Amino acid sequence: MTEVLLVTGMSGAGRSTVSAALEDLGWFVIDNLPLELVVRVGELASAGSHDYAGVAFIVGRSGGVVPDDVLAVKKELQLRHEKAKILFLDAPDDVLIRRFEGNRRRHPFAEATLADSIAGERAALSTIMDAADLVIDTGSINTNQLRRRIVETFTDASTMESLRVSLVTFGYTYGIPRDVDLVFDCRFLPNPHWIDELRPLTGLDEPVARYVLDQEPAQHFLKDVVSLLEWQIPAFAKEGKSYLSIAIGCTGGRHRSVAIAEEIRARLNLDNAVFHRDIAR
């Protein structure tokens, strides 16, 4: 069954980047289609001869978006497409201000100041954000990282189960991701950063992975986390959750968290790659 996605969120949070990434994955993407036409166009796209990976509607120009209308469209889509979801893109206010000031674009909400415009939009869209199936915070990632996040989340959507699980690694130095469901801390493990030959490497490199994983505390941690997730993931799916984002953190997000997350992915047989947010810092 074709997946149908309504992509919306705060202005400046990355809708155009998400649109391009989905198109690269073979999705049929339509930008700024009037909401009253979305259901009909979704039916035509799904019934067409072209085998799309999914159909995405980019709901933009937030100043004209009525939350009740978006939620009504989603409900109507779900009557026709079991996999109709909302993706909401968010970012902290200070990040959105910098983005608008940097590109000199006019904010869709024409308030007295840019900060007032962003605050007004956030209040107007709060209902949609609360109802979204997946929220991605783009505040701490760049355009390329956002594209990778979309690719890793929506690759081969036709083979996905009802619950899509993603793993994210991060460094506590740069802040905990705001858009994750579960967070595990592996800073208790000895840090490869303090070993000269391992410092320039990452947890994707065999010497670092072996250093981290060969420790008894790491194996104990992995056993406990994997055992927890093996029963939690089906429980989340049973409750109807569509996306589950699991974050693994260490100090800098380059060594321990990366090695641990890759091992968790392998033990849980997750097909999608891990999004390593801070590995290049």
Image: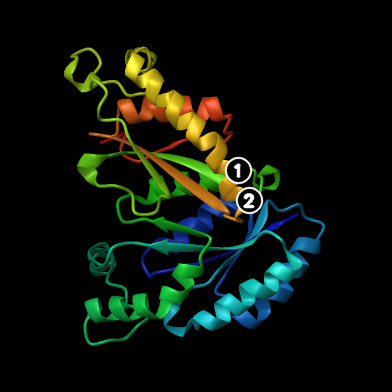
Mark identifier at residue 234: 1
What colour-coding does the image apply? Answer: rainbow
Q: Measured along the vertical axis of the image, is residue 184 above or below residue 62?
A: above
Q: Amino acid at mark 2?
A: Lys
- The N terminus: image quadrant: bottom right
**At x 47% / y 84%, what residue is drawn?**
64
Left of 235 or right of it: where is 137? left
Residue 184 is situated, as x and y percent measured from the top left of the image, at: 36, 37
**At x 65% / y 82%, what residue is drawn?**
36
Dot 1 alpha-carbon crowd within 10 angstroms: few under 14, some 14 to 19, many 20 or more: few
Q: Secondary structure at mark 2?
A: helix
Q: How many marks?
A: 2
Quarter location, residue 125: bottom left
Q: Secondary structure at mark 1?
A: helix
Q: Measured along the vertical axis of the image, is residue 96 above or below residue 27?
A: below
- Identify the residue under disc 2: 238
- The C terminus: image quadrant: top left
Q: Measured along the vertical axis of the image, is residue 17 above or below residue 209?
A: below
Question: Decide: marks 1, 2 in contact (CB < 8 A)?
Answer: yes
Which of the two residues, 185 or 173, is positioned nearer the viewer here? 185
Residue 168 is situated, as x and y percent measured from the top left of the image, at: 41, 40
Which of the two residues, 82 or 153, is positioned nearer the viewer here? 82
**At x 61% / y 56%, what residue is drawn?**
240
Dot 2 alpha-carbon crowd within 10 angstroms: few under 14, some 14 to 19, many 20 or more: few
Q: Is residue 52 visible?
A: yes
Q: Amino acid at mark 1?
A: Pro
Residue 267 is situated, as x and y percent measured from the top left of the image, at: 53, 25
Q: Is residue 163 visible?
A: no
User: What distance separates the C-alpha of mark 1 from that of mark 2?
Assistant: 6 Å
Quarter location, residue 217: top left
